[in-house]
Amino acid sequence: MDLQTVTYMFVGATFALYIGIAFWARASTTGEFYVAGKGIHPVANGMATAADWMSAASFISMAGLIAFNGYGASVFLMGWTGGYVLLALLLAPYLRKFGKFTVPEFIGERYYSRTARVVAVICLILASITYVIGQMKGIGVAFSRFLETDYDTGLYIGMGIVFIYSVMGGMKGITYTQIAQYCVLIFAYTVPAVFISLNITGNPVPQLGILSTMADGSTYMMDKLNLVVSELGFNEYTTQVMGSKLNMFAYTLTLMIGTAGLPHVIIRFFTVPKVKDARATAGWALVFIAILYTTAPAVGSMARLNLMNTIQTGPVGEVTANLEYDKRPQWFKNWESTGLLKFEDKNGDGRIQYYNDKNMDFAEKADSYGWKGNEMVKVDRDIMVLANPEIANLPNWVIALVVAGGLAAALSTAAGLLLAIASSISHDLLKGIFKPNISERDELMAGRIAMAGAIALAGYFGLHPPDFAAGTVAIAFGLAASSIFPALMMGIFNKKVNRTGAVAGMITGISITMLYVFQHKGIMFIPGTSFLGGMSPNWFFGISPNAFGCIGALANFAVAIGVSKVTAPPPEHIQHLVEDIRIPAGAKTAAEH
Amino acid sequence: MIRLTHIYQLLGKNFVRQRLLSKASSPVMQHFLSKAFPDKKKFIDEVVIVSLDIETTGLDPDKDKIVSIGLVEIRHLGIKLQSCWHQIIQTKKNIPEQSIVIHQITDDQIKTGISIEQAMPLLLEHLKGKVMLVHNAKLELGFINKICQVLYASDFVIPVIDTQALARRSLDRRNSAYNTSDLRLFNLRCARHMPAYKAHNALMDAIATAELFLAMLNDIVPRCEMDKGKARLADFLS
Amino acid sequence: MEIELLEIRNFIKRCSPFDVLDDFVLDTLPEKLTIRYFRRGHTFPEINTQEKSLYIIRSGAIEFRDQAGLLNDKLAEGDIFSQQCIVDSSESGIAVEDTLVYLLPCELLAQLRKNADVFNRHFNRSINERLRDAVKHTHAENMRDLSAMKLEVSGLTDRLPVIVDQATSIQQAAKIMTKEQVSAILVTFDNQLCGILTDRDIRSRCVAEAIALEQPVSLIMSTDLKTVKDTTLLSEALLAMTRKQVQHLPVLKNNAPVGILTTADVVRHLSTSPALIATDIGKAISLQALERISTRLPELQLQLSLSSATAKHIGEVIASITDAITCRLLELAEARYGAPPVKYVWAAGGSQARNEQTSHSDQDNALIISDEFKPEHAAYFKSLTQFVSDGLNACGYVYCPGNAMATNPQWCQPLSVWQQTFGRWINSPEPKALMLSSIFFDLRAVYGDFSLLDKLQHSVLKRTKDSQLFISLMVANALTHQPPLGFFRNFVLVQDATHKNTLNLKQRGIIPIVDIARVLALKTGISAISTVDRLNAAFESEALSAEMRDNLLDALEFIGSLRIRHQAEQIRTGVGVDNYVSPGELSGLEKSHLKDSFAIIKTMQQFFESRYSSA
């Protein structure tokens, strides 16, 4: 059976599985009233949470960034994992105690102001749409490969599918579907990793393989990779950083605190009714997330090694050591047709030279080989995970599995976010501000229209995304980090912050961050409108736009506290409320006896 | 036996009509045949169609008698109940038990009727120059033809639309298997979710047939053509 | 009219408002009709009709949508479309099924309207009241279908009429009336009924006008005589009485008087039955007596449904009887075990609390004891609750399968413990807690110190109002019962062996609305218990739009009335009562309205889902 057929079969089968489970779950809940009463086990719930958590950015994009940025890309691993822990330990318990489980509701109540609530909603919508752009990139990549079209067509088709999937409710809230999605996703991620790890190092566990010697026992795998890339003028794999140390720190911090502001993640902590189960769920989810996150570095580095070895088949400098373009493997052709991989024969020798032509030290050497610049003019990072099994010559079913997993990850997260956006727009903005008397039927319709609008918008930006999927998602986290996170933190831990302060803080934070992102990435991400250019020399203290959220957050804190100092303090009952939610749940009832 | 009229049939009903007119001796028949039938190329909604049903004591025109006649006109594809006509026919013979059950006409009622000799001119007046719509035309044509021969020594002619034939045609065209009971008026109506009439008398059956015909119009002629009003009488004639 | 067209006439007669026309008028209609056929997907009515008509849908369905594609109106079997005749509108719809219609020319309609007031009134109302009409229609159907057997006026008059000749003197007549203890007598002339003499006639036409008592009764009797046949239905007789403003109706059988129907007879039969039962309950001195009385409950429900009471009204009446039984049982228990050591309140739960009970549902109840409660009082309350619960069970309110009863020590607690329990449910709404919530958030005080329950409810509502977590889980719980409507607007029928191919009207129709109303109440802190009150209160506190409130109320009443009718039929035929209705029991019109009702519930559930599962 050819690859295309197998892929169709896998994608079809997994989606049939999700829908089947959804129907089964719907049907079985209408059983007899008195039989209901059993909850879902925390392990199962943990898997569902993990599936919610891992988006296209985690699945498709992260390993690709690790493959090319080496150690520098570990900010994603650290930031997202840290963010999860921060959220689970620092914020979720208090928000839960407060009894409000959406962020705007909390902010509206805590800052006793509808304005604060609306500002929070707008901040969230901005962050969420940016997040969806990232997912759209992943969806476009997956669909273009899956249907063997160019990227733009894949994206259009993906938009349609996302809309249908979202209108159907995205199978959301049905835990068993989420569990199935997690299983498909984690299999799709680890199975190829195991095969590749076996091939390269002889160790079946990728997490260990990355630390072991090569299969022939000659040298450590990491040393080999460092050697291969530095021979071609790239930065040494294990030591390269993204920008400066400060940028790395800012990047990680932004991702961490941004997590806390994104609504679709927080809600998972509340849908478990028992506090004890909620804790166990958070723990298990961390385990399940870790399975993927610890595999990612192995996937990234081994993919890089395989890619280099495919193109550079022998010692650097020998003419015959570079792959002939005509003999390029099938996967190369497949990805060329999506437009995400491009080759340009600059020196006209019919062979592929892939090296770092920006490295001045290496330029001389390259010149002596007769190389006229890097001929791999486009290698989209986001294709790495999907291309990985093909590069490693794994069987067709593994490749199909990965496509199915990628689609599952991208679709479920995008659908969840879009539902949240639709609900925010139709309820918080439309009903809350413009049309308080709107009927339920019209509100539903408005939600669907908002969803279609959000998809169209995200799809439009997805045609020219500001960054790779993970990078785009990082911008979304930056927006959330600069606006929502400080408002939440101060809402819980500082009873003196009042509504004026909070509103001013949120607006300052998100404005600074957006401005910074726009001036480097283009206004509304439109290429060519970036008046400061994407150049790193123009960066503020060398901090990249993706990592700027934490600076915005600092500004937010400063403005909010400053403004609160000079305006009237919050009313008494709000201050009491803030004190109350920090006392553990049991303490109060215990005191009564 | 192949009769000359059968060959004339091929030349069109109006041709047959004129042949018969030239030979007809009875004034009733002459009157009936004097008016031309609608042209076959006319649009279906411009034609006046008379939906007819007769109830009989049995199936054999030679032995059995007509018990009642019911008819209603369709004009501009609307069934005009104002044009309803129902007539009970008195017979000399008593009706067999069996058909009482079917037609719910008892001997008592039949006594209120008129003789077939009186009824026939009225029926022909209703049909004059029009198109006849019948479900399973063979039976009705057989009886009317027989009576015309006996009373007026002439064959009977009229353009006929047969809903049963139309149904068979459309089922054949779709290559779907069916058994003959599917072609019964009641079952065809059921299949279209049309209301089931409890009464089984000639008039209600004529109305039921007319309704069925309206429902079937579009089965016979593709929708798009219908919308342009392009369906012609010829598309429906048996 | 050709007698053969009777079937068409009978159909028209079933269609409101033609049902109010006199038979001889109806007889003239069929031959004025034109029958037309609209194929699925075709525009309705035809765009270029020269002759404007009123359309009666014989079979099939027509949908009217606005520009945005939202469904405005749907016509199905028996509905009429009068736009062309009423306003000069070009409104058009689409036949969504193959549709057969009867056309009545507008000129004819105008004539009919001129000649019949009641008929005319129908056309002055908004067509948007269709579902509301359907609700009424269903009750009218009840009358026709069931009361024909049960409630003809012949069964209501308990004595033969007193008859005098017209030559009898007024004084003599008055003497007879006094002796016979009647308020009206019939007057004959030559053994033919010619008038009626009532107390009022003697007062207003004789005494007030100073007419000599020796004069014959013919001078003061009412001659403009309205009579009814012995087979007339109670409801029709009542209508005749109110319309003609008379209090006495002679009942004729084969043109001979067999009785006089008085307003008192009607009123006694229509509404005092529950009151009588309640009085009997109050007088019952033993459990056996209560048991005996409770066997009359199904009959009461049947009678109520025959008298075209609304489902809401029936639910209230049945609940009030249950309340009375409960109170009496508690009084008996207190008489047996002595006065209570501390104050308590007996609270009913579930459908009884919501005043939506049908005869003989399960018992759900709870006991809330004052905080002065001491452990040694436990024994007293144990015997008290056991007595009442057993008594209810004996009266047909079987034990709750989930053991949500006051006999369960968990649900027989001092106020403070109850407050903690509710607090725990709200803070940590596990599935079990959610299930119990739907029983115990519908509590209504029945007997004892009502302030105890008030305090509890007050504190509970204060907490639920702010607990979004709890509300969202209650919403999820409310969505577990979805209306049985498939993707293509088809009914999804029950598939288990005992109730194959039926619709569970309670679980899939009424419960979802009840759940929705409860969530709205908890969310907005509404203390009302009945679903209708809750929906109205939710509208007032802007948690529900007026449109949705009206729709849900109509849907609740419509489904409720179908269920009541179904149960009435079961009671009548002596089958065990259930909520499983087969679509075959419903007319095309009712099926269509039932689907409308289900669709309304579905929309509301989808709304809840989008608000609470993703926000």
Image: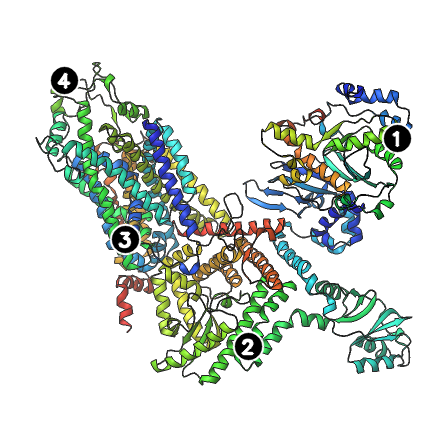
- Image coordinates for residue A258, horizontal then vertical, percent: 27, 46
Q: Nearer the viewer, mark 4 or mark 2?
A: 2
> Which residue is identified by label 4?
A367
Q: Residues within 10 Å of mark 3 (few under 14, many from 20)?
A: many
Amino acid beneath label 2: Leu
Instruction: State the SS at label 4.
Output: helix
Q: Tell me: residue A589, above or below residue C131.
A: below
Q: Nearer the viewer, mark 1 or mark 3?
A: 1
Q: Vertical placement of A442 versus C579: above or below?
A: above
In space, the residues marked 4 and 1 are separated at their CA atoms by: 117 Å
Distance from Cα at disc 1 to Cα at disc 2: 83 Å
Residue type of the residue flagged with mark 4:
Asp
Reading the image, the residue beneath label 3 is A281
Dot 1: few (<14), some (14–19), or many (≥20) neighbours within 10 Å? some
Which-is-in-front pick, marks 1 and 2?
Answer: 1
Residue underneath mark 2 = C290
Q: Which residue is mark 1?
A: B151
First in sequence: mark 3 or mark 4?
3
The disc numbered 1 marks a residue on which chain?
B
Figure colour scheme: rainbow
Both marks 3 and 4 on one chain: yes
Do discs 4 and 1 share a chain?
Answer: no
Q: Chain of mark 2?
A: C
Can you give x and y, in whole percent of width and height, for residue B214 in the image?
Answer: 69, 35
Label 2: element kind: helix
A554 displayed left or right of C100: left
